[in-house]
Image: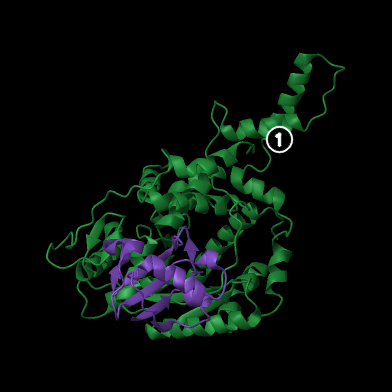
Chain colours: A green, B purple
């Protein structure tokens, strides 16, 4: 992609994206109008501690209640990731399950931790696992763990893996063995996301859970949405970033925190005296992959324009497939749009890829050359029809065993 | 002037792994704002990588500042004048998994 001249915009950001500082924040709570406000959300709305906490819990229950998917006594697998969102999620669940709670939650959560922090050394990972166990048990939940590297090496061993959970030195090598080390980081991120999704579904099936909760928050969803568009997964937007991913017939993946922002949850934890675990993070070069770049783009914009994330999210919510599609990709299980009379952008990309890699035979006429290449394109387009455009580009880059 | 500084969400990793600091700011004629405190902390408490804490004379986006349980955005951000016995908390949202 051409990026000449882009630096210019970087330098002008100061001029073109000036910070607005005219908003007057209310000293009393926007909701009850009595108490002194203590937190500002969306850069403009101030709430007191009590109204803020009630509002946050209500938002969580409302997002679950709106879809009416979960029935009494259903088992739900909760993916615990280190950080503010997961800690808040555990607290929402524990306080919601409490017998005394108003509009009590009536399902049974199981907590799962995936050991995939391979930038830490073995001792740090063991320590982290101990800390996670401690945190989860402080909420009176039982923790289940699984090693990501072991799972992708042999998914069939899952029943053994969830009971043993061994942290070993060579986990990173196992990962490199399955996912081609030389592949681009964008494709690696994408395949890891697909594998992790499969892992969650497999574990959920093993424990007979009908639902999985994942801890993505609004900013994650917004950057995933834009990454999906850039990676040619436009037709998967509604299942990848919507509230419910129902690609699998038995297990549905839900994102109960998708409308929360980080500040909300950090304040929620702070007001409830919860201290989430923190792990050493590796410094990520934002230009190293499409996903990282999108995260940087969204978070940078969000600093000065607090409506960025909600705008992306709400626009994404309006996008969905306009017809039912029965053909699904073998890798990501997403729908593959049918090819109609008109050329799709996917076919155009493939065609120009084919043309640019052909040696032209100048011994024949122009018409014949056109006929040859167009025949060849028609033959090629039948290949791999059970894999979607985006996954086929992963497959070319990464060898999945 | 005695104040308390608390670190949460991983900010303590930059400050010698200590989560609670009871500090005594040197007396001076001009009052202390949080902006002044940030610079003082960088010189006196911060152990590594100031770019992970400070950006453009304020905290880096992603670090929340809470003064006595109140969002600093309500108090004028870096211009807030620190009072004796204030508890100032810095919470990072960047150290999750």
Left or right of residue A65: residue A214: right
Give above or below for A95 relative to A380. Answer: below
Q: Quick check: can you spot residue A141?
A: yes
**In this picture, residue B49 sits left or right of residue A254:** right
Q: Secondary structure at mark 1?
A: helix
Q: Which residue is most to the left?
A: A34
Q: A362 or A92: nearer the eye?
A: A92
Q: Residues within 10 Å of mark 1 (few under 14, many from 20)?
A: some
State which quarter of the image contains the N terminus of chain A.
top right
Judging depth in this view, the residue of A80 and A97 nearest the camera is A80
The residue located at (37%, 82%) in the rendering is A139
Question: Residue A203, how many percent across, how many down?
Answer: 51, 71
Q: How many marks?
A: 1
In the rendered structure, the answer to whether residue A207 lies left or right of residue A148 reads left
User: Depth check: A197 or B5 in front?
Assistant: B5
Spot the residue most to the right. A363
Question: What's the chain of the residue with tag 1?
Answer: A
Residue A105, given in percent of the width and then of the height, sits at 28, 72
Q: Quadrant of the C terminus of chain A?
A: bottom right
Residue beneath the point at 51% across and 43% down: A229
Q: Quadrant of residue A86?
A: bottom left
**Visible in this render: residue A91?**
no
Q: Quadrant of residue A110?
A: bottom left
Residue A354 vertical position relative to residue A93 in the rendered view, above or below: above
- What residue is shown with label 1? A380
Would you place residue A247 above or below residue B18 in this image? above
Residue A171 image offset from top left, x and y in percent: 68, 74
At x 44% / y 40%, what residue is drawn?
A16
The reply, left or right, for residue B4 in relation to residue A348 is left
Residue A331 is situated, as x and y percent measured from the top left of the image, at 60, 53
């Amino acid at each position: 992609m051409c990026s000449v001249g882009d630096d210019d915009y970087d330098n002008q950001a100061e001029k073109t994206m000036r910070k607005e500082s005219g908003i007057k924040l209310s000293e009393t709570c926007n909701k009850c109008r009595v108490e002194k406000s203590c937190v500002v959300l969306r850069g403009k709305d101030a709430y007191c501690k009590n109204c803020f906490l009630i509002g946050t819990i209500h938002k969580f229950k409302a997002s679950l209640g709106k879809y009416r998917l979960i029935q009494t006594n259903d088992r739900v697998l909760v993916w615990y990731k280190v950080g503010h969102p997961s800690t808040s999620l555990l607290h929402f669940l524990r306080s919601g399950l409490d017998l005394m709670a108003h509009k009590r939650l009536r399902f049974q959560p199981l907590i799962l931790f995936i050991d995939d922090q391979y930038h830490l050394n073995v001792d740090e990972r063991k320590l982290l696992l101990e800390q996670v166990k401690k945190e989860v048990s402080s909420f009176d939940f039982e923790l289940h763990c699984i090693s990501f590297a072991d799972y992708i090496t042999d998914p069939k061993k899952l029943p053994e893996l969830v009971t043993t959970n061994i942290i070993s030195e060579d986990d990173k090598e196992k990962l490199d063995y399955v996912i081609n080390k030389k592949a681009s980081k964008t494709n690696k991120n994408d395949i890891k996301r697909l594998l992790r999704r499969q892992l969650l579904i497999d574990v959920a099936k093993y424990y007979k859970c009908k639902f999985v909760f994942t801890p993505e928050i609004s900013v994650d969803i917004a950057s995933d949405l834009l990454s999906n568009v850039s990676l040619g997964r436009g037709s998967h937007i509604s299942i990848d970033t919507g509230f419910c991913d129902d690609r699998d017939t038995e297990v549905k993946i839900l994102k109960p925190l998708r409308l929360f922002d980080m500040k909300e949850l950090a304040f929620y934890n702070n007001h409830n005296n919860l201290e989430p675990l923190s792990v050493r993070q590796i410094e990520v070069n934002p230009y190293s992959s499409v996903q990282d770049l999108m995260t940087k783009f969204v978070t940078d914009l969000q600093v000065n324009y607090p409506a960025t994330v909600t705008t992306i999210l709400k626009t994404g919510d309006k996008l969905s497939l306009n017809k039912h599609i029965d053909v699904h990709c073998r890798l990501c299980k997403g729908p593959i749009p049918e090819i109609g009379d008109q050329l799709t952008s996917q076919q155009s990309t493939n065609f120009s890829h084919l043309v640019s890699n052909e040696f032209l035979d100048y011994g024949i006429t122009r018409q014949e050359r056109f006929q040859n290449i167009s025949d060849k394109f028609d033959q090629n387009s039948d290949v791999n029809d059970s894999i979607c455009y985006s996954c086929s580009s992963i497959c070319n880059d990464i060898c999945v065993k | 002037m005695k104040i308390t500084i608390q670190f949460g969400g991983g900010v303590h990793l930059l400050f010698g792994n200590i989560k609670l600091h009871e500090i005594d700011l040197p007396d001076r004629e001009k009052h202390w704002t949080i902006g002044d405190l940030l610079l003082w902390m960088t010189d006196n408490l911060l152990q590594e990588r100031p770019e992970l804490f400070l950006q453009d004379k304020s905290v880096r986006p992603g670090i929340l500042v809470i003064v006595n349980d109140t969002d600093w955005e309500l108090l004028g951000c870096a211009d807030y004048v620190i009072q004796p016995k204030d508890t100032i908390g810095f919470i990072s949202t960047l150290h999750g998994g």
